[in-house]
Image: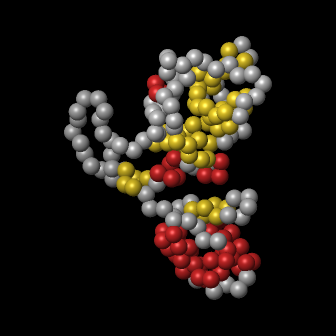
Amino acid sequence: MYETYKSRIISFYKKHGRMPGYQEIMEFTGFHSKNAVFKLIEKLVEDGVVAKDKQGRISPRNIREGIRLLGLVEAGFPSAAEEELLDVMDFDEFLTPNKESSYILKVKGDSMIDAGIHPGDMVIVERKQSYKPGQIVIASIDGEFTMKYLRKKADRYFLEPANPKYKPIYPGENFRVEAVVTAVVRKY
């Protein structure tokens, strides 16, 4: 029966684009208690099918169907192209392995253009416990947010743009790094 329940949860996810809640799982499994749902979810977590956060919400782990990774393409001199199935890749898992601490922001402005981040791009950012100089970060300065390189000079942090039109920012007291940029997404 476990495989049937697992299959129903996967089907629900594929149809609705989200994981079902406890009540929905009770409805399509025929369980009469949330405790039975809890035990089923624990088994799914143990098998690596889903993950569960601190609030008990579940998220997919090995449910998604990815896109085929066929091979490599030369970005320098042309070479013979060979199609070879290397793997199947899920962009959600690749771009956001820590979903609970990640979110997406749309880029406005051109201060990071020399880092390859253009207006209209989407950046995936992750909240972390610590940040290192050299990382591209989202920082709060006096209640305003900006994206820049985090730099350190003589025990003092500052923010450096990736565009010579802009000057570095040396923040005062109200400065906090909120997240680090982990990926840039651009659609053509």
**Which quarter of the image is occupied by the C terminus?**
top left
**Residue 160 screen position, x and y as percent:** 59, 21
Q: Residue furthest top?
A: 154
**Residue 59 screen position, x and y as percent:** 60, 61
**Residue 49 screen position, x and y as percent:** 57, 65
- State the image quarter where residue 169 is shown: top right
Residue 38 horizontal side relative to residue 49, left or right: right
Q: Residue furthest right?
A: 173
Residue 183, visible in the rendered structure: no
Depicted 187 relative to depicted 58: above or below? above
At a point 51% along the width and 65% down the height, the residue shown is 17
Depicted 162 relative to depicted 72: above or below? above
**Which quarter of the image is occupied by the N terminus?**
bottom right
Of residue 67 and residue 140, the one placed in the foreground of this image is: 140
At a point 68% along the width and 15% down the height, the residue shown is 153
At a point 63% along the width and 61% down the height, the residue shown is 51
Residue 82 horizontal side relative to residue 122, left or right: left
Q: How is the image coloured?
A: secondary structure
Depicted 107 relative to depicted 9: above or below? above
**Residue 44 screen position, x and y as percent:** 62, 69
Tag count: 0
At a point 21% along the width and 39% down the height, the residue shown is 80
Residue 105, visible in the rendered structure: yes
Of residue 132 and residue 123, the one placed in the foreground of this image is: 123
Depicted 67 relative to depicted 139: above or below? below
